């Protein structure tokens, strides 16, 4: 059993739980949205994507973020997932990341898309 992210209660008023595959997706999302140094006991946790959110979007930014994110995922989640591909695309004001990976525990192949847009 894993606690669902973001934390919330289920219909019965209990802490909401989720399956392993969704929990890993939640972990990836937390890694992407956390700034390095933001977590007190894990200063290296995070990807730095939030720093780039208001930077002018460009293919060069997407390429740089791909390298930084790949390093963060390998450093923080290499015991949970095997990354097959990680790509970024800069489209207007939206930064889109697609990650294809497999869960080490089950071997299940997954594909997730994350989009960051300034509001």
Image (cartoon, rainbow, N blue to C red):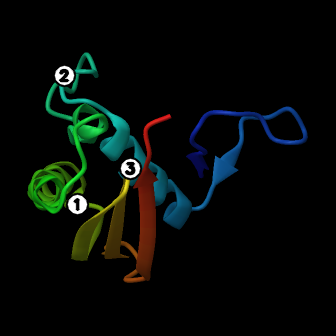
Q: Nearer the viewer, mark 2 or mark 1?
A: 2
Q: In the image, residue 117 lies at what x, y percent?
A: 44, 45
Residue at 89% in and 42% down = 11
Q: Which residue is mark 1?
A: 79
Q: Which mark is residue 51?
A: none
**Regarding mark 3 in the picture, which secondary structure is present there?**
loop
Q: CA distance from mark 3 to mark 2?
A: 26 Å
User: What percent of the width, then of the height, locates residue 107?
Assistant: 37, 83
Q: CA distance from mark 2 to mark 1?
A: 21 Å
Residue at the image point whose x is 15% and y is 52% from the top: 61
Q: Earlier in the sequence, mark 2 or mark 1?
A: 2
Looking at the image, residue 62 sits to the left or right of residue 114; the answer is left
Q: Position of residue 47 (x, y in %)?
A: 21, 42
Indicate which label's residue lies in the foreground, 3 or 2. Answer: 3
The residue labelled by disc 3 is 93
Residue 103 visible in the snapshot: no
Going 19% across and 60% down the picture, which residue do you hit? Answer: 78
Q: Earlier in the sequence, mark 1 or mark 3?
A: 1
- Mark 3 or 2, nearer chain start: 2
- Mark 1–mark 3 Cα distance, whole angstroms, equals 33 Å
Say which residue label 2 marks.
37
| Residue extending farthest right | 12
From this view, report whether residue 88 is shown above or below residue 77.
Answer: below
Instruction: State the residue at coordinates (42%, 76%).
Output: 111
Tell me if mark 3 has few (under 14), some (14-19) or many (20+) residues whose alpha carbon lies within 10 angstroms of its own.
some
């Amino acid at each position: 059993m894993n606690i669902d992210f973001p934390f919330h209660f289920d219909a019965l008023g209990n802490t909401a739980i989720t399956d392993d595959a969704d929990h890993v997706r939640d972990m990836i999302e937390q890694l992407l949205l956390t700034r390095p140094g933001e977590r007190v006991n894990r200063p290296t946790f995070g990807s730095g994507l939030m720093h780039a959110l208001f930077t002018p979007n460009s293919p060069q930014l997407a390429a740089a973020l791909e390298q930084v994110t790949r390093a963060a995922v390998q450093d923080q989640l290499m015991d949970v997932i095997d990354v097959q591909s990680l790509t970024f695309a800069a489209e207007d004001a939206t930064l889109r990341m697609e990650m294809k990976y497999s869960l080490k525990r089950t071997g299940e192949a997954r594909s997730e898309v994350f989009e960051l847009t300034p509001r």
